[in-house]
Amino acid sequence: MILRNLSNSLGVWLAVIFLLLIPNILLIDIPTISSSYDMHRIFEILLLCSISLLLLLNSNSRKWWLNYFASFSKTTYYLLISFFLLGLISAIFVAPLPKYAIQEISLFLLLFVLAITLASQIQQDSTQLRMALVAAIFISITIVSWQFVLEYFFSQLDGSITLKDNNFFWRFSNLRFFNQFQTWTFPFLALPFLLYYKKIGHWRILLLVPAIFWWTFWIHSGGRATGVATLIGIVAVLLLFRKKAVPFILFLAGTLLLGLALYFLMFLEFEKSTGATLIIEKATDGGLIRVATKAESQRVAMWLAAFDMSISNPLLGIGPQQFAFYHPIQDMAHPHNAPLQIMAEWGLPAALSIFFLIIKGAIQWITNIKQKTVAATTNIDTYLPMALTASFTAAAAHAQLSGIIVMPVSQFTGVVVIALMLSYFPINTAANNQHNHHHLLLSLFIVVVVTALLWSVFPEITRMEEIQKAITTSNSHGGLLHPRFWQQGLTDLY
């Protein structure tokens, strides 16, 4: 019985393992791979392949997947099919490098398969599996927090602490990838405390510690987009849940203030002894404004380039992932704006399909979740929808300024959030409407998509280290790597 229950929820437990691996990914040694970004991508692919294998071997998982898929409205079917079909046509007939276009389409398809797998499995044992995913996110945050604290104190001892580099964020190849992970996860900080504060007595103070450090790291990193996006998410929760959201918002606001205080305690002495300038003080003399102005001018140039591509190729775009082939602005492999990326690469009809799907889903979420929170009998059904609302809204806002839909960790975390949201929607349990050919079609679909993804990563996966080293040790492309699918994301260099 235990083994059967485990096999029926194995997708969720694989997702839990990946969440716990995020802060420790570089402890795993893979020959020729040294970048945390590439390691995260490889493990994302392994997870997607494992989920696919689970669906192929486990008839219950296939049945639940098909039941959930059958619950979609006809409008949802049409929008989904239109998006992926238009992308495939663009990949075959428009993209200068069809292989990398198919790579992105197959990745997105398997992420969709993962989301439905998780949502359908969660509904079989909703409370336990939702708690498992929430706990995995919180434990991952806690691990990063304590690693940061240990490194801080060790660096204090040997005098190597600096505010000018990413030493404390080395688990992410770029500081902003860490911020994207924060955008998805900030709202989850409140859940353990709100769910258990009455049960664990004075020990509940320990649940505050990771939240306080998470805010401290954000301040230290200077992630402006994450801060603004999280604020937008909190406002959305207040508007939707009103009085019920007060404990949730007070927790985040209180830990933010404590995180700010901790930031000054941790770095003020360092500033006095070295003459360095704190990030908070930089903001008061225009330092961050100058940095922001330069960064935004680069973003605007990328946005204009992507917009020009969408206007020049309105029907099918330039092909999925082909911005990484043309890289018109400073070798950037994506335009740092999700809507413009879809418009430029997939075309305006595909972009409209996915935008209408998101809007439709948001309206259904608002309608559905209001009813469920009113009738909620457990704390998790009261506060988890708030965290999911804040997380998804914040990520949607952050997607206007970043590649949050591109990077492997933020992609996967986003799928977990979306799957948890989908698990609150009713499922069609009419299993007798299924036929054997439905199972066969799903199996064939999975085999084809997995084969396409695995085909697309070779032989690049064996040459990544060589190509990245050649770029970073030369003046080509400014000696910098520009991530997209891999850490070196410019597809014309492979």
Image: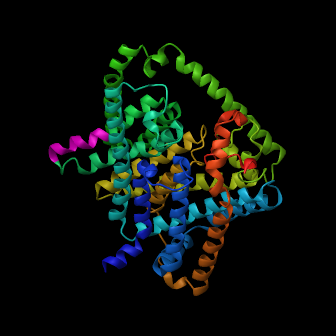
Quarter occupied by the N terminus: bottom left
Question: What kind of secondary structure does the magenta stretch mostly adopt?
Answer: helix
Q: Which one is nearer the viewer's eye here, 198 or 319?
A: 319
Looking at the picture, tell me which residue is in the foreground, 29 or 341.
29
Q: For the point 37% across and 52% down, which residue is it?
A: 384
Image x and y of residue 305, in percent: 76, 37
Residue 268 is inside the magenta segment? no
Report the number of discs: 0
Coloring scheme used = rainbow
Q: Position of residue 105 (x, y in %)?
A: 67, 60
Q: Hey, which residue is sitting farthest left in the picture?
A: 201
Residue, x 24% and y 50% (percent of image)?
196
Residue 321 appears left or right of 385: right
Judge whether 277 appears above or below 237 on screen: above
Residue 144: x %, y % from top left: 38, 43
Can you see residue 67? no
Horizontal and vertical percent position of residue 303 = 71, 36
Q: Residue at x 18, y 49 (%)?
A: 200
In the rendered structure, the answer to whether residue 69 lies left or right of residue 278 reads: right
Q: State whether residue 155 appears in this view.
A: yes
Seen at 28% across and 47% down, the residue is 194
Pick whichever, 241 or 169, lies toward us.
169
The span shown in magenta is: 201-210
Q: Is residue 346 rendered to the left or right of residue 129?
A: right
